[in-house]
Image (tube, coloured by chain):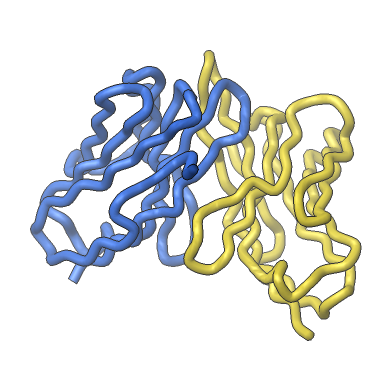
Chain colours: A blue, B yellow
Amino acid sequence: DTAVSQTPKYLVTQMGNDKSIKCEQNLGHDTMYWYKQDSKKFLKIMFSYNNKELIINETVPNRFSPKSPDKAHLNLHINSLELGDSAVYFCASSQGTGPQHFGDGTRLSIL
Amino acid sequence: AQSVTQLDSQVPVFEEAPVELRCNYSSSVSVYLFWYVQYPNQGLQLLLKYLSGSTLVKGINGFEAEFNKSQTSFHLRKPSVHISDTAEYFCAGLNYGGSQGNLIFGKGTKLSVKP
């Protein structure tokens, strides 16, 4: 049973397209996150939701819009994709100060 | 500014040798600290965590870390590494406020274990 699952695992698309990444967790956690890992492996928070409410919104372009239909799901929609959006996007979830559990990542490549 | 610093970007070591991966955190980061491992083309897996209590924390795969408040360090150690330990290791601190927080990651240390 996968605790945090993301789909798709790989996403290859052209500049200017709109795409979505889905994330689901079955751990019963209240908080979910999106992190971006760049080509140098650096991980940085993008968004955090607690019980469907946006808590953290780092300096991310408006083209990125998270949506949380319920506390078990946090999706990421990206409009007008650019070359610089190529990265690995990780979803995670946690409860309080407990450790964050990560999905396997979505590898986004922009052609 | 809140930060987590991993002092070594790469650590090559021979199999069965001991290893230490260094991590320092800024005092503005909470003392909830974590080490994660990332194998090639995979997600992040929790190795160990320090939330409170004993400063020596034991994790999976024979790893341990010691929380040192005076030196603001949380170094990761293993007495004898295997080839299978080759991976990227990330130290992280919890930026905690209210009932939730995000992780602040170090830039990672690539551990390469050679036969």
Q: Quadrant of the C terminus of chain A?
A: bottom left
Percent of width and height locating residue B35: 68, 47
Query: In the image, B102: left or right of B31?
Result: left
Percent of width and height locating residue B41: 48, 66
Q: Is residue B36 above or below residue B49?
A: below
Q: Residue furthest top?
A: B98
Pick whichever, B115 or B105, lies toward us. Answer: B115
Residue at 83% x, 78% y is: B15
Q: Count the numbered circles shown.
A: 0
Residue at 50% x, 55% y is: B43
Query: In the image, A5: left or right of B52?
Result: left
Percent of width and height locating residue B52: 79, 25
Q: Is residue B7 above or below residue A3?
A: below
Q: Residue furthest bottom?
A: B115
Q: Name the image quarter holding residue A110.
A: bottom left
Percent of width and height locating residue A100: 55, 36
Residue at 75% x, 34% y is: B50
Q: Is residue B55 above or below residue A8?
A: above
